[in-house]
Image (spheres, helix red, strand yellow):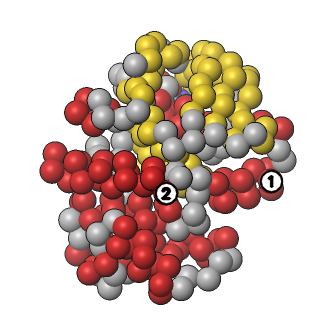
Amino acid sequence: MIELRRIEKNYRRGAEDVRALRGVDLSVEKEELLAITGPSGAGKTTLLHILGCLDQPTQGEVLIDGINASRLPEAELVKLRRDKIGFVFQQFYLIPGLSVFDNIALPLLFSKKPATPEKITHLAEMVGLEHRLDHVPSQLSGGEMQRTAIARGLVNEPEILLADEPTGNLDSENSEKIFEILRSLRHNGLTIVMITHNPDLSARANRILHIRDGLVHTES
Ligand SMILES: Nc1ncnc2c1ncn2[C@@H]1O[C@H](COP(=O)(O)OP(=O)(O)O)[C@@H](O)[C@H]1O
Ligand SMILES: [Mg+2]
């Protein structure tokens, strides 16, 4: 589903070059739940952004579903990202003035697909929020906010869901719920890559990738 070949990423910080990724090879299978762990600054977020075509590598190739994303023009890349990839972040990035319904439906505005009540209600049910559709984010718990963000990440029916510390702002009970929701989504054909510092969660992924100093340190 996803293949990375010899990925390097350098950032420029003032006069110095930061080597955030130093040659990462990775294959992610369809319907796999892959956990990425590693210390702060190891390159996890950089790797996730490159996996999701949010950022281009300095060197190396990214293949999404057989398509070489490294060679696509920007307009094609925007389409690939929109059609195949969903994102969930640690900070939920919900729009405060919009209801749960409208927050979930928001990406459809950009893909110009219809936001039918059936579709949004179905997604809300998948994450257990069907009773909250009229609420605004300030009326939700942290766990409910993240569940809204997951439903929003799924609204364009992506094949890949990328999550950067999705439970990083949640207590253990809500972390557990979010993880189980993510895990259950694999059965709908979704491939999931999740960065997490929580060993209880990563232990239950299909595979753990430990990143250190911009390299894959161990796999288990
Ligand atoms: N936009 C950027 N500009 C410069 N340096 C960056 C940028 N993004 C990340 N870095 C650096 O790249 C390294 C890896 O960062 P990151 O991928 O965010 O690590 P992690 O998610 O594992 O904490 C760090 O040294 C970080 O400071
Ligand atoms: Mg990070």
Label disc, if present, on residue 76 of the rendered structure: 1
Residue shown at the point (50%, 79%) measured from the top left: 119
Q: Please state the horizontal and vertical placement of residue 95, each as a whole percent of the image.
A: 42, 71
Q: Please state the horizontal and vertical placement of residue 202, each as a whole percent of the image.
A: 32, 32
Q: Distance between the residues labelled 1 and 2?
A: 26 Å
Q: Evaluate if marks 1 and 2 touch, with contact meaning CB atoms under 8 Å apart.
A: no
Q: Locate the C terminus and report the quarter of the image it occupies.
A: top left
Q: How crowded is mark 1: few (under 14 residues within 10 Å), some or many (20 or more)?
A: few
Label disc, if present, on residue 185 of the rendered structure: none
Residue 67 to residue 149: above or below: above
Could one spot residue 87 in this view of the protein? Answer: no
Could one spot residue 67 in this view of the protein? Answer: yes
Q: Which of marks 1 and 2 is nearer the N terminus?
A: 1
Q: What residue type is labelled 1?
A: Glu
Q: What residue type is labelled 2?
A: Asn
Residue 177 to residue 207: above or below: below
Residue shown at the point (23%, 70%) measured from the top left: 140
Residue shown at the point (57%, 36%) measured from the top left: 29
Residue at the farthest front position: 187
Image-based side of 23 in relation to 76, left or right:
left
- For disc 2, the marked residue is 188
